[in-house]
Image: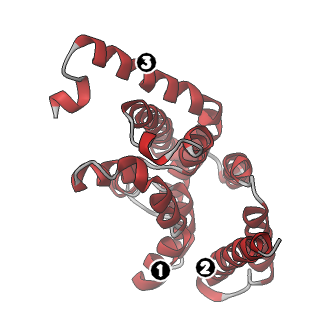
Amino acid sequence: MQKWLFGPDAAVASQRRRDFLRGMQAIAPAAAATGMWGLVTGVAMVKVGLTTGQALAMTLLVFAGSAQLAALPLLAAAAPVWVVLLTATVVNLRFVIFSAALQPYFRRFSAGRRLLLGYLSTDMGFAVFLSRYADRPAHERGSSEQVWFFLGMAASSWLAWQSTSVIGIFLAAQVPAEWGLEFVAILGLIALMMPMIFSRPALIGAVTAGVVAVLAAGLPLKLGLVLAVVVGIAAAMGAEIALQRAAGNT
């Protein structure tokens, strides 16, 4: 582990630090949105009735803001556990796609290290990483530069989220309900999501999910959100397949 973290010699360790810092710099523009989202999520966890210990455990173990915010109203409504788990799973299905795209870069690592990298993965980190390295040929994927760039982004995002989320948890009692911080969380989520809509299928999926979420808002147990995510993913995948077929016929 020490060799993996610091390198076999000073030159390698120095290069890894530079790559790590570049990753932190690349993700820095998203830090403000991540921090605001984490702060509001920390407040929300306590406001729905979680104890301080439960809220801390959730933010440290789950580390998935969208899934946490989706699950909280269900917990407040005393929804069945299977509904809460299903909702969080559906909301996080996008990470299956992220993992498949990142696999060529990290497949040489052990299962334990891949699990750690998976835990640290974020939406914005995925988008920034692929925008930088997606065009690299297959034999150049998984280099030390790429790994440490990813770790720099991941560490910065994790610290921004956890620190602000913990602050929100401990300040929740002092935040008046009339401040309406839920809307700030929505703004933070939009700020994180917009840079990821860089293709036509992604745009179609996002618009479809938004329309379905509005139309299905009256469903019990917030199941409209689950339906919106499923339909949005299906629309994006269908658009991707249609575009590929169209390109193949030209």
Q: Is residue 213 left or right of residue 144?
A: right
**Camera sees residue 63:** yes
Give me the C-alpha separation between circle 3 and circle 2. 41 Å
Is 110 rendered above or below residue 201? above
Disc 3 on helix, strand or loop?
A: helix
Q: Which residue is mark 2?
A: 226
Where residue 140 sits in the image (x, y, percent)? 44, 39
- Type of amino acid at the residue the image marks with label 2: Val
Give me the C-alpha separation between circle 1 and circle 3. 41 Å
Discs 1, 3 touching: Cβ within 8 Å: no
Is 163 rendered above or below residue 213? above
Where residue 149 sits in the image (x, y, percent)? 46, 32
Disc 1 or 3, which lies upstream in sequence? 3
- Type of amino acid at the residue the image marks with label 3: Arg
Quadrant the C terminus occupies: bottom right
- Type of amino acid at the residue the image marks with label 1: Leu
**Farthest residue in the front direction?**
250
Q: Is residue 121 left or right of residue 241?
A: left
Discs 1, 2 touching: Cβ within 8 Å: yes
Residue at screen point 54% across, 48% down: 126
Q: Which residue is mark 3?
A: 18
Q: Which residue is mark 1?
A: 86
Count neighbours of disc 1 (C-alpha within 10 A) and say few if under 14, some if 14 to 19, many if 20 or more: some
**Camera sees residue 173:** no
- Asked where in the image residue 55 lies, by quadrant, the reply is bottom left
Disc 2 on helix, strand or loop?
A: helix
Disc 1 or 2, which lies upstream in sequence? 1
